[in-house]
Amino acid sequence: MRGLAKTSRSHGAMELVDLERPEPGPDEALIEVDYAGLCGSDAGIYEFESAFERMELPTVIGHEYTGRIVEVGDDVTKFSVGDRVVERPIRGCGDCYQCEMGQENVCQNAVITGVDHDGAYEGYVAVPETALHPVPEGMDPKHAALVEPTSIGARAVIQNSRVSPGDRVMVAGPGPIGQLTAQIARAQGGEVVVAGVGQDADYRLPLAEDLGFQTVNVADDDLEARRDELTDGVGYDVVFDTTGHPSGLTMAVDEVRKGGQIVLVGQTGETTMPYSPLVRAEIDLQCSYASMYEDFERSLRLIASGDVDHATFLDDRFSLLEADEAFETFLEGGTCKPVFDVSVLRD
């Protein structure tokens, strides 16, 4: 089989490499990968941002995927050959304080699939039973491949925000997590607006409109006038910053109402701003990172109910055999959620 691996510490440097089909350990299942998504963190690896310096190269990337079990180790008891599954890609150690407290997503010793060990852009992957999550047999496998990013939005909205029916909500950033967060916030009863920048105007903001949202173009619109129009001059009750850009938080502070909430989902890096206005306005600043078992369960139900529309959201135009096109188009804002057919790597 083959895999798409990051091979050097520079922009691009993704190569198809020959690999041996892995042998599952006693507590592992061997997954024949069907479909895998392209995440913002995968694009970060492609650009080789500083957050990924710890990677030992070459490493096969990819962590959003679905597949079917084709072999199980002797100690596997919860899954059988033929089961359809997804992986929870942040693996906690099980022993640190956070894991003992049920906060595996912020484990002190966590390892991440596609970063710290080979990921899903390969024909087969061996995964510990404890990291697997069952998928209903009737779910479209392309949609199942997006359960993991959906779970991040589910955690941000359902677990970590206070969105309630009738709340006015802004989602800053129309990328993959932003589009999913917006859909889940709407399912919770929020009146949702999606904001983007100039490069989002051709694909990602129109996608948000196709999904039924009002949009704001930060580059072209009068933000104050639009905020007054959409919130009766009060400001948004909840603002989700999914941009991953230093300007996201500062914009969120301008857009949220006094006494409102900002939920940070994108990993912004450094930003500089005065914090006294947040204190004087008693703004609730909440962070949300990754997801856990219950977030995957909620995501499966949101997809099954139609509250999350993956059919409109996903983009299956691209191939792992010519992956640079997908990554470059993603970075330019010309796509939002590429989903790859991984079976081509088994040919």
Image: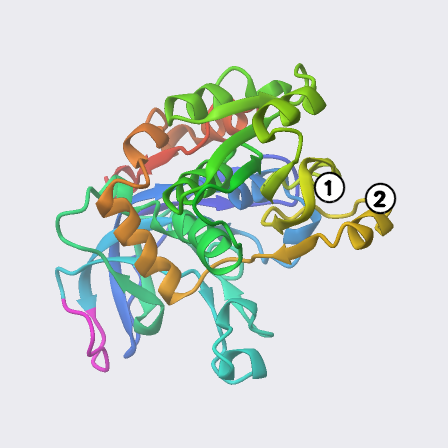
The x, y position of residue 5, in whole percent, is 48, 46
Q: Which label's residue is closer to the chain start, 1 or 2?
A: 1
Q: What element carries label 1?
A: helix
176 left or right, relative to 298: right
Say if mark 1 contacts mark 2, CB within 8 Å.
yes
Q: Name the residue under label 2.
A: 273
* Residue 337 at x, y percent in the picture: 42, 34
Task: Identify which residue is drawn at 27% across, 47% down.
Answer: 144
Confirm whether residue 331 shows in the render: no
Residue at position x 65%, y 45% in the image: 9
Q: How crowded is mark 1: few (under 14 residues within 10 Å), some or many (20 or more)?
A: many
Q: Which amino acid does label 1 sit on?
A: Val
Q: Position of residue 223 (x, y in %)?
A: 69, 23
Which residue is identified by label 1? Answer: 253
Residue 78 part of the magenta-drawn span = yes
The x and y percentages for residue 253 are: 73, 41
What segment is highlighted magenta in the picture? 72-80
Mainly helix, strand or loop, the magenta region?
A: loop
Viewer-proximal residue among 202 and 309? 309
Q: Residue furthest front?
A: 232
In the depicted structure, whether residue 156 falls above or below residue 326: below
Q: Classify mark 2: helix, strand or loop.
A: loop
Colouring method of the image:
rainbow
